[in-house]
């Protein structure tokens, strides 16, 4: 009975810590969403209006006006992507989605940056509920891998494969230009922290992250999580004190 009591106490402590951690993350998501919307995006939008007014004041055939209008269109896409990220942060804070829905939604936002690229999402096995911290970190790893593929790889096809088994596996594969030799050697691109951040997130959930890339032959990023699923609460025994 003492051993069971100690086990149950430990479960309660760990559960309370996880709940507290998720509450902190939810609050942080809401804070970031407010900051992005109320300061950064509003400031960028005001700047676009000023540049747009300047462009409109130039003659129609002026090459400078054409350059500004092209830049404004690109900046407008960036703002739209930022608003999508704010929406996603809000949605995540309110009602967490299954990871496959999260990645599909992210792909829909990224695909306009590579209109000729084909995207496919594959799910193998019966979907199971991931532990909250695993879903959080795995989702961020998947989205970062897709951002790199859509924005930088020049890929014609991007495949995301999710496998629910004894282990949870997430694979993002593209047929793009692949990583540069120095990036493969160092594990990250100078001044860019996406790959390094993915490795850190994988370590935080006890997962393995494999990055396989060949110049001109695409990149495959595979996340393998041994203990990924939400565990059921232990059943209360009928004779247990305090029932």
Image: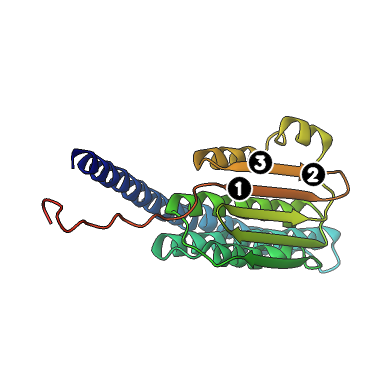
Residue 62 percent location from the top left of the image: 84, 62
State the mark number for residue 195: 3
Spatial CA distance of label 1 from label 3 is: 16 Å
Spatial CA distance of label 2 from label 3 is: 13 Å
Are dots 2 and 3 in contact, CB under 8 Å? Answer: no
Disc 1 crowd rating (10 Å Cα; few below 14, some 14-19, many 20+) is some
Q: Nearer the viewer, residue 57 or 84?
A: 84
Give the quadrant of residue 201.
Answer: top right
As displayed, is residue 127 above or below residue 2?
A: below
Q: In what element is the residue under mark 3?
A: helix
Disc 3 crowd rating (10 Å Cα; few below 14, some 14-19, many 20+) is some
Q: Earlier in the sequence, mark 1 or mark 3?
A: 3
* Left or right of 64 in this view: 126: left
* Left or right of 24 in this view: 72: right
* Left or right of 11 in this view: 37: right
Q: In what element is the residue under mark 1?
A: strand
Q: Nearer the viewer, residue 35 or 148?
A: 148
Front position among marks 1 and 2: 1
Q: Earlier in the sequence, mark 2 or mark 3?
A: 3
Residue 55, can we see it? no
* Left or right of 177 in this view: 198: left
**Image quadrant occupied by the N terminus:** top left
Residue 11 percent location from the top left of the image: 29, 45
Find disc 1 in the rendering and name its residue: 224
Q: In what element is the residue under mark 2?
A: strand
State the mark number for residue 213: 2
The structure residue drawn at horizontal position 71% and vertical position 34%, both measured from the top left corner, is: 187
As displayed, is residue 20 above or below residue 120?
A: above
Give the quadrant of residue 196.
Answer: top right
């Amino acid at each position: 009975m003492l051993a069971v009591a100690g086990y149950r106490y430990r479960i309660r402590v760990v559960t309370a810590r996880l709940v507290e951690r998720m509450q902190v993350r939810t609050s942080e998501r809401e804070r970031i969403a407010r900051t992005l919307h109320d300061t950064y995006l509003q400031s960028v939008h005001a700047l676009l209006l000023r540049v747009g007014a300047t462009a409109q004041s130039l003659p129609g055939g002026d090459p400078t006006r054409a350059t500004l209008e092209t830049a404004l269109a690109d900046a407008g896409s960036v703002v739209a992507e930022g608003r999508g990220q704010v929406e996603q942060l809000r949605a995540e804070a309110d009602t967490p989605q299954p990871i496959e829905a999260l990645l599909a939604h992210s792909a829909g936002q990224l695909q306009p940056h590579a209109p000729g690229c084909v995207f496919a999402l594959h799910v193998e096995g019966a979907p199971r509920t991931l532990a909250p911290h695993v879903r959080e970190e795995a989702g961020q790893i998947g989205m970062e891998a897709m951002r790199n593929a859509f924005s930088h790889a020049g890929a014609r096809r991007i495949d995301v494969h999710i496998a629910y088994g004894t282990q949870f596996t997430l694979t993002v594969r593209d047929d793009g230009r692949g990583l540069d030799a120095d990036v493969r050697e160092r594990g990250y691109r100078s001044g860019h922290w996406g790959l390094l951040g993915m490795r850190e997130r994988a370590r935080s959930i006890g997962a393995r992250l494999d990055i396989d890339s060949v110049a001109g032959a695409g990149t495959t990023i595979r996340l393998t999580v041994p203990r990924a699923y939400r565990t059921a609460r232990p059943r209360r025994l009928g004779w247990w004190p305090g029932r």
